[in-house]
Amino acid sequence: MITISVIIATYNRATLLHRQLRSLQKQDLDASDFEIIVVDDGSTDYTDEVVRHMQKTMNNLSVIKQDNQGPAVARNKGASVAKGSILAFTDDDCLVDANWLSIIKKKFSDESILGLQGRTTTVKKLVTPLTHQVLNEHGDYSTPTCNAAYRASVFSKVGGFDPEFPFQNEDADLSWRVRERGIIQFVPEMHVLHPPRPDSFKKNARKMKHLISEFMLYYKNPELYKKYRAANPWITIYWLVMVRAQGYHFTRRIKYIHKPIMMLQGIGLSLVWWIQLLRLLPTFIDSDRKYSSLY
């Protein structure tokens, strides 16, 4: 009987997905006890070939294809066909430890636990100003979906991920709604490695636009936002992100002085982000008005 359904949303990361599936193939939990559902969110690379190749040695691996609609829709699609009473989420650019699923199963033997978040680390020596990685070593109220698990019954009751989120904050929204019903436990031994993933300067430069989702997250439930993040989205964007986070990153990037090109890329990226945050002010004002009227 399948206990755990592992759900991975993927989009044009065939090589990384292959690496992740190989790590799931090495789980110490019996393969008959879990299934792996890959939701292909409209990939145009060789993702399909990778999945077919892995299915030759992984009888518990299935794939769902959909037009590109984003990670929230993809994960909900996977959950809708899942057979397990536990839904485990990770990302295509991660690597799970061999005991990841056995620890998840063991922790859910406590009926009071509604969700779990694991410890996520990275390879710090490979981090550069242009890499993406997730680091969650002590717990995060947002419960990053690269290393999380929920009871399927609770996931269904709260309505799963909200597909209206524009790419970012759908995991925080779900986590907060589950936390209002019970416990999401941080489990250090539930470990996932999130190796630094190189991205282009252009792609990194566009990241600030995703902060629009802060307004939706706030107006959807202001009290939860104040409880778990900040008094309002403006403080998050222009104090926590623009001043504190970007100030920290700017000073940290000077350490690459022995690699001048990398240092200049990092400092340049910080400057671009500051400029973007100023240029996005009218957009943020419009978003504030939009979501305040919707909720």
Image (tube, helix red, strand yellow):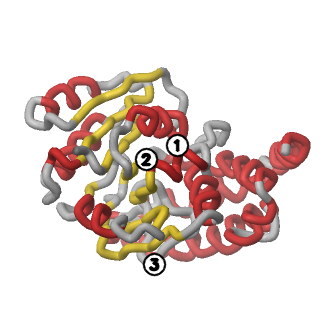
What's the residue at 41%, 75% (across, down)? Answer: 137
**Label 1 secondary element:** helix
Horizontal side of 44 relative to 247 (left or right) equals left
Q: Give the spatial CA distance, label 1 vs label 2.
A: 6 Å
Q: Is residue 41 visible?
A: yes
Q: Give the spatial CA distance, label 3 vs label 2.
A: 26 Å
Residue, far left? 57
Please report whichever mark, 1 or 3, sits nearer to the chain's N-terminal start.
3
**Residue identified by numbered label 2:** 199
Please count the marks in the image.
Answer: 3
Q: Are marks 1 and 2 in contact (CB under 8 Å)?
A: yes
**Label 2 secondary element:** loop
Q: Is residue 268 visible?
A: no
Tell me which amino acid carries mark 3: His
Q: Are marks 3 and 2 in contact (CB under 8 Å)?
A: no
Which numbered marker is on residue 37?
none
Please report whichever mark, 3 or 2, sits nearer to the chain's N-terminal start.
3
What's the residue at 50%, 37% (across, down)? Answer: 76
Residue 197, position as x, y percentages in the image: 37, 52
Q: Give the spatial CA distance, label 1 vs label 3.
A: 29 Å
* Figure check: 176 above or below 11: below
Q: Residues within 10 Å of mark 2 (few under 14, many from 20)?
A: few
What's the residue at 74%, 61% (across, down)? Answer: 237
Which numbered marker is on residue 203?
1
Horizontal side of 130 relative to 282 (left or right) equals left
* Figure check: 286 above or below 51: below
Which numbered marker is on residue 138?
3
Q: Quadrant of the C terminus?
A: top right
Q: Residues within 10 Å of mark 1 (few under 14, many from 20)?
A: few
